Every structure is written in structure tokens, then in C-alpha cells.
């Protein structure tokens, strides 16, 4: 394995594994934003793997950041680490440095008309952890070009809303003050693609957590005088689950590495192909990942107390966020039809 | 918490760019060679027997690519071979004549054969002029392969074989068979009583293949009777009693290749052309999901190829890809019928799409039977996960 990715994976898994047991996740759901844990993330620079060295980051690529994103899925991390990673990468592409504090990533492309001078007008802009945001980051379309917008959220009307994972998915409306604008050498819809990539990696992590919990439970729980793991039907569920997890893991990591190698801006075959494949496969896999990990657990997995739901509820949310299997499948289907039957394989192997 | 999920990973491999030229050469060769060939024949790809095609592929140096040059091989990397194999599969090249020899019998002979066997047989393999069959299953030993009973007894100067093999592809027209026989009848030595043999079918009497027609009418596999078939001393390949270990080694090659997910890719190509521009968004989404699956499986398969290339043993990973690949390719004919109202047809009727669908919907049940069933694959995976 890529050595940097391995080191990151070990350290991030250690931090979140130590801090986020089920008791902690329950407390956070009751009491809100885990400020102390966010400070630890910031101290360790976990959100800045993709930030440039000038911005105090690692200057690493998505192939390395994958370790962080997957770990966020695995440990059901209730923090905007994926969103911050995207924001930092955008800033690195634009050659700017973001402010300190929790970022509010504007997940939809901003209409060019929404930005005028130092004014940004939002009308129900979906923003993960918007209520905690110290600043906003978004991408605006400027003709065929794109612009990175940084804004101050003071004065915006915030409608608090949570997704199924009870992570904040707030909507922001009103007028915000733009604090920085930078030309961005990326397509204007890049946040949707990057979000889809990040959620794929998180689904890979959430699926891995479901598998590990199911394996552990199947070994501990006995019925008919033997552990569940001794039953062939259960073994086959676990094998199917493991393969499904591995498939999401593989394509999500491959998409991250493709983005590092080919970018997403060039004409022709670039990393959009792998990103679409990753989110399509990951979203489609959620049905099996959640169904089998719950089935192995029986009724206990359906309780709040046990805590399998911390990952499975997030998997159900992430499946749809930044587009589901239908949207990304349709993108790939259009690409396939455009090149025709004979052109599909060259597209895959390009 | 210790993580099992963290141990089952498929490290991505990007093929080195210098393989692009080889890929382009293979594509051009296949486009020219396969033009005008029946799409039904092409749809069977690695189960389609065509000695002339294999000889042409061999003449290009694309069979036995990884085998040593001193035996007529080409000393090329496993990744170069991988490129040729996946291009042949996707193009629907009829590779059935040389498939087994290229994939496993050639490497087996190079590893365990006598010097004389290597010099005599391996060059024929690399020229695409030797067809191999593999004698494994028996009438009473399918998934429980190690229960097999066909007996090879020592006689002065060699071996005498009695018993029956079944589902042996190409046994009626192959030049050689690699077979697994029981050399020690001690019931306590279920696995340890097995040995592998290399049989020259052109020179051995007492071996009678009888083709078994499959449900689609094809005659590809056989029941093979061995009645006092006498083999020379050196027919034993590898070591006596090591047959099970050697076969398991071979299975890593047999189960890990791109043929385990690409059997229906030719159909996906034809489906795309058939529905083409008039496809609804919902249909496009389903087609795109298949493209996503194929891309995912290719990444997993390439990762295994890299491990094989590095001399590792990816037996667990191979079982995962075979299980997933089978789910993918076996579902395609049914998906086609959901997305397109055209009926499947027999050869010579309807569009190319209809003929390929008609062909593959009938053979798809075999995808989850050949090379180990999903039930066996999942047992192996469960063992790898530590629950069995």
C-alpha cells in the first residue's frame, strides 16, 4: 500500500477509534457539535491532507486523502472532515489560503448572478454543518470558467436540518459578504463531483465498519448451540458482504488515484469516469451493505443501544447525497451510448 | 477493534503506459481477424474452439507469453499477458482451443514437467497448436473434488488408470489432458492420496471421451472413461501425493482472470448499440451501472494480476472477484430483457443483439458452475474472514 496512505490510515483510525465509541456518538447526537474533537482534527491537520504546504497542509493527493475519508465513514465521524478536505483542495487549486475555523461548504454550484462585488446571495443553499460555519466556501460559474468564493456567513438565515445520520445539513438564505474570490481552474460543477467522490470513500468505510461488526457479532452470538458464524447461511452473507465492501473500497480508491493522475478538467477521458463509477457502485451497494450487516445482527442491530445504526443510517444518507446510483449511472450510460458498443471498452481501459 | 475489512484490500494498479502499444496491436489484429465471424461464435469467446484462430494468435507471439524463451515462450510479464487476454475476451475472440494451455497447463509443465516434456510440449502450446483438457470432476465428485476415485496404479514402467471423469471441456478434441487421479486409496488420505498426470491423448489407448450435449445444443464437454489406460512413468507431473496442492495453486490462475467477469461483455456492447440513442434516462442509468460494475471489477482483477506478477498468492482475492464477477455477468441477460423488448433469438435470426442474447442467456447458468460455484467461493471467502 501507498506508504503515506497507510500511515494516515493508521493514525486517523487510532484517533477516531479512541474518541468515537458508541457512548461518545450517542452523547454527540444529544449535545451537538463535538468542538473538542474538531480541535484535535485541526491540531493534527487531518482536514488539511489536500491543502497546499503554503496553507499549512500536507500537499498530498486524493490517493492519500482517501485514508481520511474512508476512516470518517468507518467511525461515523460527526464532523465536516470530508467537506473541509474538499474546500482545502479547491483552495489549493485556486492558489489561496482559507480562513481558520469550521468551513461551510456550499454543495451546489453558485449561479454567476448570485455573486456581485462583495455580495453573495443564497436562497436555500444546502450546507453541511452550516450552523457551525466560520466561513463559507463555494464555486460559482463564470461563463465557462469557475471562481472560488469565500464568504462570511454572518447575517444569513440558517434553517437547521439533519440528515438520517443526524449530521447537520442546513440550508442558508440571505446576503453574505464575500471575503475572497479566486479564479479556479476546474469545472464549475466540481463540488458535486468531489462530494460524490468523498461520499463513495465514506460509504467504503461505513461498509467496512458494518462488516467488522457483523463478523464480531457472528463470532460471539450463539444459537442452536453454536456461534452464528458456524452456520453456512451466515458465512455466505458475510462473504457476500465482504466482497461488496471490497468492491466499493477498490473503485473509490481507484477514482481518487485517477483524480490525482488525470484531473477532472481536461477534455476527453479524465477522472470523471472513475468518480461516476465509484458513486454509482457505492450508492448501489448501500442496499446490500446495510441489509446484510443488519440481518447478521438480528434484532439487536435494530436497537439504538447497540449502535450499528451509527454507520447504517449514515450509509442511507450518503447513498443519495451528491447524487445516487441513478444520476451517476445515467452519466455513464450517456457516455457509453455516445461512444457506442465498440467504444465502451476503450473508454474503460483508457 | 481489529478489522478484518482492512485486510481484504485491492491495491489499485495502473498498467504501465508502454502496454498501450501492445493493446493497440492486439485490437487491430482482432478487428481484422474477427471481421465477418458469427456473433454467436464470438459470444462464447473462451469456450469457442477454433484451432486456426489460435494458430494465428500464437504466430503473433500472444500465447504462452510469460513462459521461458528456451521453450518457445516469450518471457513477457503477466501484465502483458493480461492485456492480451482481456482484449480477446472483450472482442469475443474464439480462444477455446488454447485457453487452458495458455492459462494453466503451460505454466504447470514449465514448473513441474521433465526437461523432455518441456521441450516437446511447451513450444506447441506457444504456437497455439496444442489443446489441453483438464480432468477434474467425476460423476460422484463435483464440488467435493477431493472425494474423487479415478485410480492410477503403479505398474512396471508406468501407471494404469481406471475410472471416469466428467464435464471435461474439449476432451474429445484435445491433444493433452492434465488429470487429477487417486494414487493412494487409503481412505485416511483424502487429499494426500491425489496426484496430477500429464496425458498425451493422441498416443494413449484406453481413454474414451463421449461428448455431452449442453442445453443450448453445444458439444463442448465430455464424459471420459479410462479403462486400463496405461501411462508412462513420467506422466506423473509434480510429486506423487502433491496433486491437491498443485491443483490449488493452479486454481489461483483459474479463478482470478478477467474471464470471470467478462463473459457477457460482448452482450453489453450489443445492448448499447441496440438501445442506443433512444434509451430513456432510466435505461441509461441501468446501462451505466453495468459500466460502473465492469470498471470496478476490472480494477479488482488488475490488482490481482499485479499480485500474481509479484509472485504473491491472491487465492482469497481471486475467490472474491470470481463471486462478484459471476453475479455481474450472470445478471446481464436478464437485465437486457428488462431494458429492451426484443426477444432472444437463435443463430441466424434477428439482430446481432438478439442472437448474442439468445446465446448467452442459455449458457449463463454455467457461469456459476464452472471453475467453482459461488457456494464454494463463499466458503473460501468465509475461511479467509476467519469465520470458518
Image: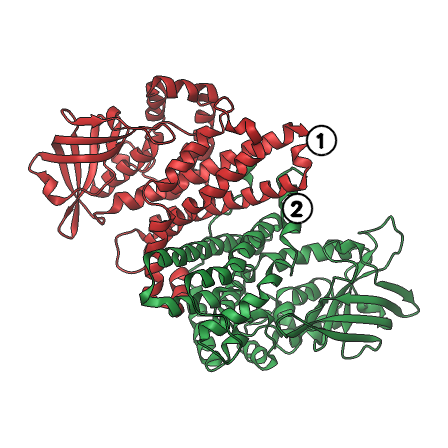
Chain colours: A red, B green
Q: Which of the numbered marks, if any, corresponds to residue A126?
A: none
In the rendered image, residue A300, in percent from the top left (x then y), is placed at 55, 26
| Above or below for B18 versus A114 | below
Are labels 2 and 1 assigned to the same chain?
no
Q: Nearer the viewer, residue B208 or B14?
A: B208
Secondary structure category for the residue under label 1: loop
Image side of residue B262 versus residue B149, left or right: left
How packed mark 1 is, by other alpha carbons closer than 10 Å (few <14, some 14-19, many 20 or more), is: few
In the rendered image, residue A266, in percent from the top left (x then y), is placed at 26, 56
| Above or below for A57 versus B132 | above
Q: Is any part of residue B14 visible from this angle?
A: no
- Label 1 marks a residue whose chain is A
Q: Which residue is mark 2?
A: B379
Secondary structure category for the residue under label 2: helix
Q: Is any part of residue B107 visible from this angle?
A: yes
- Label 2 marks a residue whose chain is B
In the rendered image, residue A233, in percent from the top left (x then y), is placed at 64, 42
Task: Name the quarter where the C terminus of chain B is drawn.
Answer: top right
Q: Nearer the viewer, residue B96 or A301?
A: A301
In the rendered image, residue B125, in percent from the top left (x then y), is placed at 64, 74
Q: Which residue is mark 1?
A: A224
Query: Within the image, what quadrant is residue A204 found in?
Result: top left
Task: Name the quarter where the N terminus of chain B is drawn.
Answer: top right
Amino acid at each position: 500500500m501507498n506508504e503515506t496512505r497507510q500511515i494516515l490510515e493508521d493514525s486517523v483510525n487510532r484517533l477516531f477509534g479512541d474518541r468515537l465509541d458508541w457512548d461518545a456518538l450517542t452523547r454527540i447526537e444529544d449535545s451537538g457539535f463535538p468542538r473538542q474533537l474538531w480541535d484535535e482534527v485541526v491540531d493534527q491537520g487531518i482536514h488539511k491532507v489536500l491543502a497546499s504546504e503554503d496553507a499549512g497542509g500536507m500537499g498530498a493527493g486524493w490517493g492519500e486523502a482517501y485514508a481520511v475519508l474512508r476512516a470518517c465513514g468507518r467511525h461515523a465521524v460527526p464532523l465536516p472532515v470530508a467537506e473541509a478536505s474538499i474546500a482545502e483542495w479547491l483552495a489549493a487549486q485556486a492558489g489561496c489560503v482559507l480562513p481558520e475555523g469550521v468551513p461551510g461548504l456550499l454543495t451546489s454550484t453558485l449561479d454567476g448572478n448570485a455573486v456581485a462585488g462583495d455580495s453573495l446571495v443564497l436562497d436555500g443553499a444546502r450546507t453541511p454543518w452550516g450552523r457551525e460555519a466560520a466561513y463559507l466556501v463555494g464555486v460559482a460559474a463564470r461563463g465557462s470558467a469557475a471562481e472560488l468564493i469565500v464568504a462570511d456567513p454572518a447575517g444569513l438565515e440558517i434553517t437547521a436540518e439533519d440528515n438520517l445520520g443526524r449530521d447537520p445539513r442546513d440550508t442558508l438564505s440571505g446576503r453574505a459578504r464575500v471575503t475572497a474570490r479566486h479564479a479556479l481552474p476546474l469545472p464549475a460543477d466540481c463540488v458535486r463531483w468531489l462530494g460524490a467522490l468523498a461520499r463513495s470513500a465514506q460509504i467504503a468505510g461505513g461498509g467496512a465498519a458494518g462488516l467488522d461488526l457483523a463478523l464480531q457479532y457472528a463470532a460471539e452470538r450463539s444459537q442452536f448451540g453454536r456461534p452464528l458464524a458456524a452456520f453456512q447461511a451466515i458465512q455466505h452473507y458475510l462473504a457476500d458482504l465482504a466482497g461488496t465492501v471490497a468492491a466499493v473500497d477498490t473503485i473509490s480508491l481507484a477514482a481518487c488515484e485517477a483524480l490525482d493522475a488525470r484531473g477532472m478538467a481536461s477534455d476527453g477521458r479524465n477522472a470523471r469516469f472513475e468518480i461516476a463509477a465509484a458513486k454509482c457502485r457505492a450508492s448501489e451497494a448501500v442496499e446490500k451493505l446495510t441489509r446484510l450487516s443488519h440481518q447478521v445482527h438480528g434484532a439487536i442491530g435494530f436497537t439504538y443501544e447497540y449502535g450499528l445504526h451509527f454507520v447504517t443510517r449514515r450509509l442511507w444518507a450518503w447513498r443519495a447525497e451528491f447524487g445516487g446510483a441513478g444520476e451517476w449511472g445515467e452519466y455513464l450510460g450517456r457516455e457509453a451510448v455516445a461512444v457506442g458498443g465498440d467504444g465502451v471498452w476503450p473508454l474503460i481501459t483508457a | 477493534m481489529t478489522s478484518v475489512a482492512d485486510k481484504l484490500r485491492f491495491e489499485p494498479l495502473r498498467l504501465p503506459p508502454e502496454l498501450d502499444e501492445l493493446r493497440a496491436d492486439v485490437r487491430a489484429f482482432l478487428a481484422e481477424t474477427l471481421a465477418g465471424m458469427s456473433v454467436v461464435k464470438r459470444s462464447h469467446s473462451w469456450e469457442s474452439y477454433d484451432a486456426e484462430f489460435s494458430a494465428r494468435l500464437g504466430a503473433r507471439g500472444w500465447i504462452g507469453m510469460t513462459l521461458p524463451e528456451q521453450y518457445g515462450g516469450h518471457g513477457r510479464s503477466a501484465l502483458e499477458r493480461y492485456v492480451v487476454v482481456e482484449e480477446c475476451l472483450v472482442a469475443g475472440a474464439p480462444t477455446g482451443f488454447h485457453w487452458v494451455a495458455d492459462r494453466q497447463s503451460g505454466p504447470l509443465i514449465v514448473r513441474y514437467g521433465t526437461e523432455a516434456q518441456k521441450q516437446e510440449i511447451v513450444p506447441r502450446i506457444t504456437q497455439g497448436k496444442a489443446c489441453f483438457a483438464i480432468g477434474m470432476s467425476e460423476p460422484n465428485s463435483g464440488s467435493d473434488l477431493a472425494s474423487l476415485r479415478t485410480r492410477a496404479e503403479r505398474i512396471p514402467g508406468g501407471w494404469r488408470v481406471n475410472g471416469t471423469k466428467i464435464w471435461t471441456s474439449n476432451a474429445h478434441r484435445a491433444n493433452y489432458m492434465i488429470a487429477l487421479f487417486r494414487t493412494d486409496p487409503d481412505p485416511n488420505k483424502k487429499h494426500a492420496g491425489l496426484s496430477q498426470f500429464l496425458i498425451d491423448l493422441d498416443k494413449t489407448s484406453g481413454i474414451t471421451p463421449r461428448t455431452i450435449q449442453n442445453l443450448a445444443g453445444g458439444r463442448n464437454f465430455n464424459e471420459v472413461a479410462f479403462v486400463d489406460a496405461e501411462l508412462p512413468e513420467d506422466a506423473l507431473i509434480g510429486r506423487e501425493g502433491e496433486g491437491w496442492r498443485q491443483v490449488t495453486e493452479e486454481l489461483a490462475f483459474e479463478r482470478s482472470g478477467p474471464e470471470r467477469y467478462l463473459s457477457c461483455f460482448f452482450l453489453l456492447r450489443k445492448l448499447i448499440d441496440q438501445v442506443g440513442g433512444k434509451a430513456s434516462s432510466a435505461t441509461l442509468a441501468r446501462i451505466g451501472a453495468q459500466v460502473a460494475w465492469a470498471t470496478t471489477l476490472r480494477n479488482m482483477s488488475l490488482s490481482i494480476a499485479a499480485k500474481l506478477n509479484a509472485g504473491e498468492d491472491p487465492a482469497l482475492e481471486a475467490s472474491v472477484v470470481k463471486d462478484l464477477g459471476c453475479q455481474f455477468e450472470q445478471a446481464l441477460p436478464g437485465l437486457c430483457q428488462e431494458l429492451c423488448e426484443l426477444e432472444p433469438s437463435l443463430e441466424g435470426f434477428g439482430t446481432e443483439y438478439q442472437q448474442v442474447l439468445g446465446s448467452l442467456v442459455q449458457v449463463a447458468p454455467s457461469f456459476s458452475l464452472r471453475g467453482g460455484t459461488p457456494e464454494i467461493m463463499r466458503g473460501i471467502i468465509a475461511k479467509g474472514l476467519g469465520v470458518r
